[in-house]
Amino acid sequence: MGRHQRQGKKAKSDRPKARRNWEAIAALATIAGVVLAFVFGYLPLASTRNWWPFQAGCSVIVNTVPNKVDRASAGADADGNGQAHVFWQPPRCTGSDSPIIEYQVDAWLFINGNPQHVVRIQTAPSTSRSMIFTGLTNGDSYNFGIIAINSIGQSEPTYTNIVIPPRTTSA
């Protein structure tokens, strides 16, 4: 018998097998750690961040303002005396790791087809997709700028069509 076998130690031929077992255990521990980190660390973060990693085809920039509202989804209709109904859909891709917290809608007065200045501003929560814009003058032309806002700042505005609240006639 060899010296190593008498002292209860394993022969040299057994050492590579033991090493392979530890490598397998280390690999499994690494995989388990990654899975646990994803489930308990990354998913809760993603759920508080508007699920942005799961928006297919969307680029995300950390700490930036949101993308603007899609022009095709934005519009406005005259809605009675001094009012307009303004509607929109949120951007398909937020573009930021910070979710939209509200929308700001600016009413621009148009004279002879040219924008003059903002006459009123109203806000809506992030879950809103429309609002009744009040305080307009009947017969004047208005265009509405819809702005998405997150904790970092404001998107570029998306403008709607021009709306003219109807003049009321006295009976």
Image (spheres, helix red, strand yellow):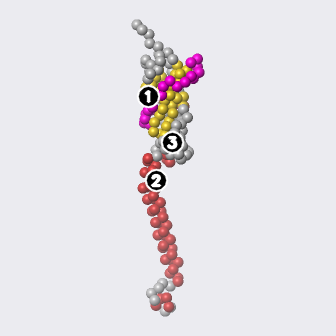
Res 68 label: none
Q: Residues within 10 Å of mark 1 (few under 14, many from 20)?
A: some
Could you tell which of marks 3 and 1 lies nearer the N-terminus?
1
Name the residue that disc number 1 marks. 131
For the residue marked with disc 1, what is the amino acid?
Met
Please check the rendered image and state whether residue 97 is part of the magenta-colored stretch, yes or no. Answer: no
Q: Does 153 sit above or below residue 144?
A: below
Q: Label for residue 42?
A: 2
Above or below: residue 87 compared with residue 44: above
Residue 37 percent across, percent down from the top left: 45, 58
Q: Quadrant of residue 116?
A: top right
For residue 143, say whether it is visible: no
Q: Is residue 148 above or below residue 82?
A: below
Residue drawn at 50 percent across, 46 percent down: 97
Depth check, front residue: 49 or 70 = 49
User: x%, y% of residue 57?
Assistant: 55, 44
In magenta segment, residue 115: yes
Residue type at tag 3: Ile
Distance from Cα at disc 2 to Cα at disc 3: 21 Å
- Give the mark, 2 or 3, whose residue is nearer the N terminus: 2
Residue extending furthest toward the top: 171
SS assignment at label 1: strand
Q: Is residue 99 above or below residue 132?
A: below
**Label ID, residue 152:** 3
Question: In front here: 27 or 96?
Answer: 96
| Residue at 53% over, 45% down | 63
Q: Nearer the viewer, mark 3 or mark 1?
A: 3
Helix, strand or loop status at disc 3: loop
Q: Which residues are magenta?
A: 111-130
Tell me how far mark 3 sits from mark 1, CA to CA.
Answer: 24 Å
Main SS, magenta region, reads: strand
